[in-house]
Amino acid sequence: MNVYLTPLQHDALCEIFNISVGRAAAAMGGLVGENVSLSVPAMRFCSIDALKDRMNMVEWQQVSAVSQSFKGSFEGDALLMFPNDDGMEIVRLMLSHVKQAVDINELRGDALIEIGNLLFNACLSSLADIFDEEFIFDIPRLRSCSGSEVLAQESHSPRNPVLFLNIQFTLGKRHIEGFLAFLITLSSLDTLRHGADRFIRREGTTSTP
Amino acid sequence: MSNQVLIVDDSRVSRMLVRGYLEESRPNWRYFEASSGEDAIALVQKEAIDLVTMDINMPGISGLAAGERILQLRPKARVVVLSANVQANVRDKAEALGMQFLPKPVTAATIVRLLEMMEQE
């Protein structure tokens, strides 16, 4: 059961993220020089602890995770996670456009950070425009760790909410799975709800109490 | 026509992409790189830079603050913000400070647009 959002607020946020991810797909397509299809099959909004259990994240042996803090009327940390080196294919395609001779392994971290930067900015810029807000971004960082460690951030309690999107990247015939998570503070939850309500009103639907 | 270009971005891959595409079209231009706003300002004090491509979100001062300072030092230079941060108010701030804005990712089409901007007064 979703304890954080009404069903209508949940639908509104799904729609907002579909718009955002569409923007991100266009950005990524340009980056890798291929049509990129990004799908968001499910959005989950639950506590960090519940998410770890539901996604069975302890099974993820090695995760490459780009994280970026953001501040605004709601704030937290955005994470892009590729379990088991799934991000390498995107990195290879991105670096195929670099004209100089490159060592993919040397530039892997830098390229993954840039991919995360593009995705976070596409999502949060859409949210900023829809919510009529401004977000300030910190510098993105890359970590390699296990699935059980990846959501452990000093600033978040395991009971804090996380907005979690399972994103499937389709590049040509290749399917790559990545996960996008927004760990937000409890105090930011009301702002997110109000933003979803404003979006619902703007779209001409009636919110249920 | 611009011939001294400074590429400012903390991402090495982004700098390589911008430089690679630009060098392909303009092999005779002279290229400089900086990975922070502070380094960019220091370089502009020494070199007569005509065109700056500027990321926004970097360690140290932001690209907008660095671009503003660069335009004070070199009022005739063109500063084009190249950023993934496409929030409307970020674009507005860049334009209010006398910079132009192009959204990332860096692609061949982005660089074509950049060169078109350079040819417009």
Image (cartoon, rainbow, N blue to C red):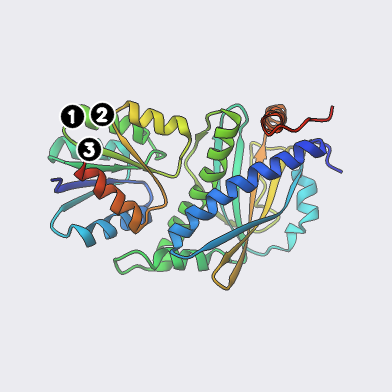
Q: Which residue is more in the foreground, B52 or B100?
A: B100
Q: Is residue B114 above or below residue B67?
A: below
Label 2–label 1 contact, CB within 8 A: yes
* Label 1 or label 3, whichever comes before in sequence order: 1
Which residue is identified by label 2? B69
Residue positioned 58% across, 61% down in the render? A37
Percent coordinates x, y for residue A69 in the rendering: 55, 39
Q: Which residue is more in the foreground, B39 or A130?
A: A130
Percent coordinates x, y for residue B41 in the rendering: 24, 35
Label 2–label 3 contact, CB within 8 A: no
Residue positioned 34% across, 46% down in the render? B9
Q: CA distance from mark 2 to mark 1?
A: 6 Å
Q: CA distance from mark 1 to mark 3?
A: 12 Å
Quarter of the image where one finds residue B99: top left
Residue positioned 87% across, 43% down in the render? A1
Secondary structure under the numbered disc 3 in the rendered image: strand
What amino acid does circle 1 point to? Leu
Dot 1 falls on which chain? B
Which residue is identified by label 3? B78
Kindly give the residue lying farthest to the right in the view shown: A1
Which residue is identified by label 1? B73
Residue positioned 23% across, 32% down in the render? B70
